[in-house]
Amino acid sequence: MATAPIKAQAFLANLPLFKELAPDELARMADHTRQVRATRGEILFHRGDPANGFYLVVYGQVKLAFISSKGDEKVVEIIGPGASFGEAVMFMEKPHVVTAQVLADSLLLYVQKEAVFEELERDPKFARRIIAGLSRRLHHLMGDLEAYSMRSGTQRVIGYLLREFAAGKEPAGPLEVTLPTTKGIVASRLNLTQEHFSRILHELAAEGLIEVQGRTVRIPDAERLKQYAM
């Protein structure tokens, strides 16, 4: 296999999963990494396809979703730059359980399974980082399950807005950010219908808590919005 471009090695070096690897270790990983340029709407893999590696997003956006036999879709996760997906089923040596579709023109790195397994055998610390990464993903998914089960639709929407827009910081003052994808996909991510999601946005706007223009949402007072969800 041809060696991956050096910029792939540099990108791998900046990811939490790989940042402690030595240059020669990174070079071995890059040797088994290929760049994937994907256009909006392209399917990376379907549910049931073999998982012979995992993906890292350099730029762009990928949707992971369940799709029923009738074509109904439930978005599980939206993957952005710097994040990875596909590791869990790769380690289990099971087929993919979701379908991955590109939401915007993207550049991804595809790391082959053999390279990861070889590095796991060489370096126990690498195994711990892999486990930590998978544990964070599980913790995030458990948080989603709690939100779907215990919170109202309005609370879910407010939580999403504050979490995404405040980028993990304590919300205070005005915020203005564009939704990362269509309202229908965001709604599915929150386990809501698009109609319910739109109705909640309308109700919050009527209360003066947000202002919506297309995919742009302005929050005049983040603290007031946070209190409204309680």
Image: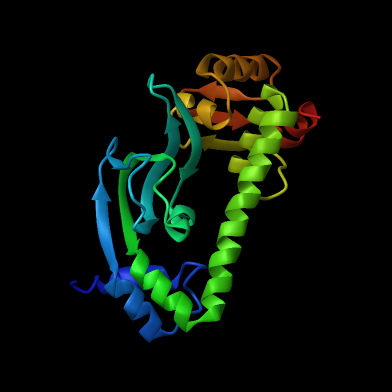
The image quadrant where one finds the C terminus is top right
The answer to whether 108 is drawn above or below residue 148 in the figure is below
Q: Is residue 108 left or right of residue 177?
A: left
Residue 40 visible in the displayed image: yes
**In the rendering, at what x and y percent does residue 2 appear?**
18, 72
**In the rendering, at what x and y percent does residue 167 appear?**
61, 48
Q: Is residue 73 left or right of residue 196?
A: left
Residue 114 location, quadrant: bottom left
Residue at the image point whose x is 58% and y is 72% from the top: 128
**In the rendering, at what x and y percent does residue 21 appear?**
46, 80
Residue at the image point whose x is 47% and y is 67% from the top: 15
Residue 171 location, quadrant: top right
The answer to whether 27 is drawn above or below residue 145 in the figure is below
Residue 32 location, quadrant: bottom left
Instruction: Please say which color scheme the image uses.
Output: rainbow
Which residue is at the front of the view, 200 or 63? 63
The image quadrant where one finds the N terminus is bottom left
Which residue is at the front of the view, 38 or 45? 45
Which residue is at the front of the view, 14 or 139? 139
Residue 220 visible in the displayed image: no
The answer to whether 96 is drawn above or below residue 133 in the figure is above
**In the rendering, at what x and y percent does residue 37 appear?**
25, 51
Residue at the image point whose x is 69% and y is 34% from the top: 147
Residue at the image point whose x is 48% and y is 25% from the top: 183
Q: How many marks?
A: 0
